[in-house]
Image (tube, helix red, strand yellow):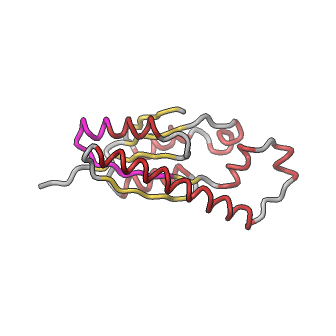
Amino acid sequence: MTENKNLLLVISSERDWKRPAEEAIKIAVEKSYNIHILFVIEDTRIYYLNKMNETEFMSKKISTELTEALLREKRQSAYSVVEKIIEKVREKGIKVKSSILSGDIIPLVINLAKEISAPEIVLSWHHESFVKKFFKGDPIEKIRERTGLPVSVIIE
């Protein structure tokens, strides 16, 4: 008996997970996939850039202690979200695995997609700031290009 393939569900926000999770479950049911949830906690400095205006950001030195505290807080939120998604996935009788990783979303998604041999990716995406897009380019296109996989993007 062959094991089902693992659809990769990528979440990067504790607020924007319900619709992407529903879409991943729908696809998994239709195509007999398992689901691997990847919650990405992005670089905390980028988080601050999105939360502060440039002047405010430049006037504050972000300490290691503050960065670590924020990372702990975001990791706790991520665990809570992942547990909720796991519950919804299991209700449908779908096997599920999960990972919570911090760093740059692009290499994390690409590497995990290859590692688990994902047939496709469902990606939660929230409106990004100009600063983030300026520094990183278009992450969705980079993921598509580098994995060669279909990527369903749910914009929140």
Q: Position of residue 43 (x, y in %)?
A: 63, 55
The image quadrant that residue 133 belongs to is: top right
Which residue is at the front of the view, 70 or 135? Answer: 70
Examine the structure image and report whether residue 36 is included in the region drawn in magenta: yes
The quarter of the rendered structure image containing the N terminus is bottom left
Q: Position of residue 149 (x, y in %)?
A: 37, 41
Which residue is at the front of the view, 32 or 22? Answer: 22
User: Which residue is at 54% across, 47% downward?
Assistant: 12
Instruction: Give the magenta part as a residue range.
Output: 26-39
The quarter of the rendered structure image containing the C terminus is top right
Examine the structure image and report whether residue 64 is included in the region drawn in magenta: no
Which residue is at the front of the view, 23 or 144? Answer: 23
Q: Is residue 111 left or right of residue 43?
A: left
Image vertical order of residue 66 relative to residue 81, above or below: below
Name, please, the residue furthest toward the left: 1
Name, please, the residue furthest toward the bottom: 65
